[in-house]
Amino acid sequence: MSDTTIFPQLEIPQTIAAGPGPGNTDPRVLQRFASAGVADHMQPDVLRGMVECKHMLRQVMGTGNIHTFGVAGTGWSGLDVMFSAVMPGDRVVMFVNGTFSGLDGLTVRMKAATAEELAANPMDPQPASVTIVTVPHGQSVSGEIVEAALAEHKPKWAAMAHWETGSGRVNDLRGFSDACERHGVMGLVDAVSSLGVEDFRIDDFPGVHGWASCPQKGICCLPLTYAPVSFTDRYIDVLKQTGCRSFVHHPILEARHWGIIDGKDAEKGTYHRTHSAYAVAAFHEALRIALQQSIAQRARDYAFHEAALRKAVTRMGCKVTSNMTSLVVLNLPDALAGREMELVQTCRATGFGIWPTLSEPVQVRIGILNLLTPAAITDIVTRFGAALTDMGAKIDMPAVLADLDQHYAPALAAE
Ligand SMILES: *Cc1c(COP(=O)(O)O)cnc(C)c1O
């Protein structure tokens, strides 16, 4: 008798990815992923595709930064590359207003800790050189908060999330960049949730020297592809002086395969690690889609559809506390307070993939990544209303849906 266990083929159902991310991957992206041939990572079309991705990514991010490329993996992979320039003992001020900036803070503390500080608390080091400025859940990091902290601590680096997906709050990027410039601090920004959703050009924020995003939110490219990153020449110069303790996640070395060599665009890349032709083809298509739709139009679409969803859930008696345009974070009507997890689990069990918050307080998060049609939003509103009704809420669904129709009528008439 053999003890080999072969499980049946894995079937994963189609669900509505109505959470903070991942978003619904565009079918065009999946099609390119599945139709790429097997080709190695030095095959000419793969290398050409990577160089084209780099050029398109610069347009999507709005930058002339030479060091703009994709990091294989997810948002944390790009963030790890961005934070790799933070060395033990570096003075850093990190602004935290939710789950993700909290984890960015952990990353920073791990990088900035001295060997002794890391050994003292390996999973959660508390280096003396890092200041964590905590802003309460549900509030934004303001320019004033950044200004005050940088004036007091005069760090080498400052970091924050642009959009804190944990609480759905937009932080003051302009204020952050201006304060960094005033104090000669190098800003690092987690733009995982905002890239491809909001209309902004990173070069308009000269206080920020490192940016990191992800494939699967605003870029709509989940099939494990590339986390966009971009670094200014100043960041690269600092890194050249200090070095960093990673081969694979080294901002200068990782850039080589994208045809960025010795600070210049090369005709083609040189080996850094094995890249997947499938991933390159998918990422390439996702960037083409973003540019075809235009970032400005996408940003308008997100704002328009988020307003519709916000109005509908507010009409149901929920209280929205977020201000991102890809995500609504809300408190349930008073009568259902405390039953957020039950609601989320019930919805998720039917393939309606909404989320709770991952850190206190417990709230409900409904996302609309790549769900930018009246039909998709109406479906979300209908499902959410039905779930609340099942839990005993008294909701005038015909009125909610009539409001929604009214929101969409002008747009539908114009089509
Ligand atoms: C989603 C998210 C991350 C983590 O991205 P992964 O793709 O899960 O690695 C980090 N920061 C922010 C602000 C996010 O929204």
Image (cartoon, rainbow, N blue to C red):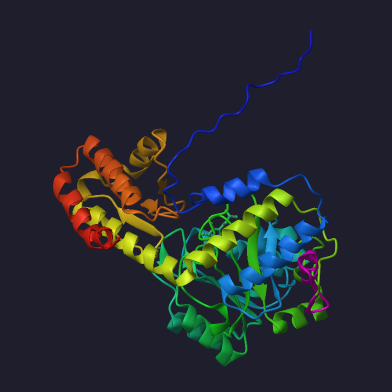
Front one among 113 and 270: 270
Task: Please identify the quadrant where the N terminus is shown.
Answer: top right
Figure quadrant of residue 311: bottom left
Going 27% across and 47% down the picture, which residue do you hit?
A: 337
* Residue 150, x across and y down, in percent: 55, 84
- Residue 320 part of the magenta-drawn span: no
In the image, taking residue 254 as reference, residue 328 lies left or right, namely: left
- Residue 259 part of the magenta-drawn span: yes
**Residue range corresponding to the magenta coloring:** 252-265
Residue 168 vs 376, above or below: the answer is: below
The answer to whether residue 18 shows anywhere in this view is: yes
The answer to whether residue 395 shows anywhere in this view is: no
Going 16% across and 51% down the picture, which residue do you hit?
A: 402
* Residue 264, x across and y down, in percent: 79, 79
In the image, taking residue 227 as reference, residue 367 lies left or right, namely: left
Where ligand 1 lies, by image quadrant?
A: bottom right
Residue 22 vs 213, above or below: the answer is: above
* Residue 2, x across and y down, in percent: 79, 12
* Residue 197, x across and y down, in percent: 46, 65
Residue 374 vs 58, above or below: the answer is: above
In the image, taking residue 346 as reference, residue 46 lies left or right, namely: right
Residue lying farthest to the front in this orientation: 415
Task: Please identify the quadrant where the C terminus is shown.
Answer: bottom left
Front one among 18 and 126: 18
Figure quadrant of residue 168: bottom left
Front one among 45 and 184: 45
